[in-house]
Amino acid sequence: MNVLAKPADLEAAAPAGAFVEEVKFVQHYTDRLFRFRMTRPASFRFRSGEFVMIGLMIDGKPLYRAYSIASPAWDEELEFFSIKVPDGPLTSHLQKIQPGDAVLMKKKPTGTLVNDALIPGKRVYMFSTGTGIAPFASLIRDPDTYEKFDQVILTHTCREVAELKYGEDLVQETINDPLIGEFAKDKLVHYTSVTREDFPRQGRITDLIKSGKLFEDLGVPPLDPAVDRGMICGSMDMLKDTKALLEEAGLTEGANNKPAEFVVERAFVG
Ligand code: A2P
């Protein structure tokens, strides 16, 4: 299988409508998760929480997958958080990228997990599992998020303890950041749980909502459509089950053209 990953090779073969960007940094967390940073085209603008199509040329053809942009809009580079699927058509190759390699990025970002799709409220819950934390990595570093909400609760549930590290480092960096730390240290709450290993807090986020333990642990009232807002990002099943719980609590789903009380990641749908 021939995978083009050098900037010069890719520039020559890149399809129209795609940027060719250079990988600057790669960090592997576990055998299932890694993150990478790459150059950002000067003309590329996006809203925090949006996703973009990332790809490689494989056997002469571009292969893309949707990736949430994990870096904030003010960052001069772009960051992504990815799973590694051993026989995944894209991630089996993408997981081998090194600094100096190049990747393709389509030009137009899009997505539903944006502040504009939520009506104002007091508290925003960002519910994530696994790599679903990526769009929130962008949103928790966006000053608009803290302007809009008094409290920003980022929940992250993973199978294994080691998979939480990305989020733990991210929250620490956010709180220590000279620009965003001022807002984050008073408003940002990081709530983690693990489902397949020993950890002080165990269980799926859906079970922690259902039992009321999430709200008890946070010291806040149960979900209330008058003040609470939600954003959901994870596997298809997690999206469906978490959405059902928010609807049960009386929250309605919003979109870019019709802001409401919660939004669901649409990167993997349709
Ligand atoms: P579990 O270990 O019980 O399957 P994945 O890597 O498969 O996307 O899973 C990431 C996390 O999401 C795991 O902790 C997993 O729990 C949890 N999860 C999987 N399905 C759901 C669901 N339908 N609702 C809530 N959490 C889920």
Image (tube, rainbow, N blue to C red):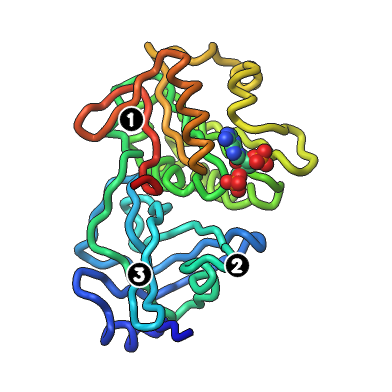
Q: Position of residue 266 (x, y in %)?
A: 36, 42
Q: In the picture provided, is 107 more to the left or to the right than 134?
A: left
Q: Is residue 42 visible?
A: yes
* Residue 157 seen: no
Residue sitting at x 52%, y 61%:
35
Does the Cβ of the disc 2 residue fall within 8 Å of ligand 1? no
Residue 86: which numbered mark, if any? 2
The kind of residue on which mark 1 rests is Glu
Binning the other alpha carbons within 10 Å of mark 1 as few (below 14), some (14 to 19) or many (20 upward) gives few
- Tag 3 residue: 39
> Ligand 1 is located in which of the four quadrants?
top right
Residue at the location (48% across, 77% down)? 99
For badge 2, the amino acid type reads Pro
| Earlier sequence position, callout 1 versus callout 2 | 2
Q: Earlier in the sequence, mark 3 or mark 2?
A: 3
How far is mark 3 from mark 2, CA to CA? Answer: 26 Å
**135 and 84: which one is in front?**
84
Task: Compute the Cα span from label 1 to label 3.
Answer: 28 Å
Q: Nearer the viewer, mark 1 or mark 2?
A: 2
Identify the residue at image location x=23%, y=55%: 45
For label 3, the SS is: strand
Q: CA distance from mark 1 to mark 2?
A: 41 Å
Give residue 112's quadrant in the image.
Answer: top left
The answer to whether the residues at label 1 and label 2 have Cβ atoms under 8 Å apart is no
Residue 34 coordinates in the image, percent (x, y): 56, 62
> What's the amino acid at mark 3?
Thr
Q: Position of residue 113 (x, y in %)?
A: 35, 39
Q: Which residue is mark 1?
A: 147
Q: Is residue 41 left or right of residue 146?
A: left
Can you tell which mark lies on residue 173? none
